[in-house]
Image (spheres, helix red, strand yellow):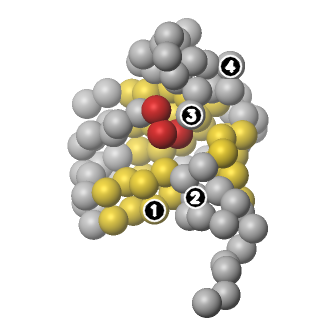
Amino acid sequence: MSTYYLANDGSDNLNDGLSEASPKRTLGSVSLANDDTLLLKSLNVFVGSLLLDSLVNVKVSTYGGAGRAVISCGDGYGIRFVDPIGGEVSNLHVCGSGVNPN
């Protein structure tokens, strides 16, 4: 059970993401496991998608201020759960370009 932090001024190469003082930078930089928490820095924008596949009780939220963190997913999914058991997403803004026609 770990808590990971992401911030736009973080580093995927130099930081471990395990504290506010050493955040990772991108959504794809963290491999979540059961009972983990992912916290995105308030008012920061994270480009991409977050896939939560077959995980138990994973939590995703904002830290470090009153404003919500943003996941900007373009044409993709913002947060995708596949076969989850429990879990929680709160205090985030997820935006994209909408659904593509077939």
Real-space Cα separation, disc 4 to disc 2, in angstroms = 21 Å
Q: Position of residue 71 (x, y in %)?
A: 65, 49
Residue 14 marker: none
- Name which residue type carries label 4: Asp
- To which quarter of the image does residue 32 belong? top left
Q: Which quarter of the image is occupied by the N terminus?
A: top left
Real-space Cα separation, disc 3 to disc 1, in angstroms = 16 Å
Frontmost of labels 3 and 1 is: 3
Q: Is residue 26 above or below residue 80?
A: above
The residue beneath circle 4 is 9
Q: Earlier in the sequence, mark 3 or mark 4?
A: 4
The residue beneath circle 1 is 80
Real-space Cα separation, disc 2 to disc 3, in angstroms = 13 Å
Residue 26 marker: 3
Secondary structure beneath label 3:
loop
Residue 78 marker: 2
Q: Are marks 2 and 1 in contact (CB under 8 Å)?
A: yes
Q: Residue furthest bottom?
A: 102
Crowding at mark 3 (Cα within 10 Å: few <14, some 14-19, many 20+): many
- Name which residue type carries label 2: Gly
Q: Position of residue 88 (x, y in %)?
A: 42, 53
Q: Is residue 77 above or below residue 36?
A: below
- Name which residue type carries label 1: Arg
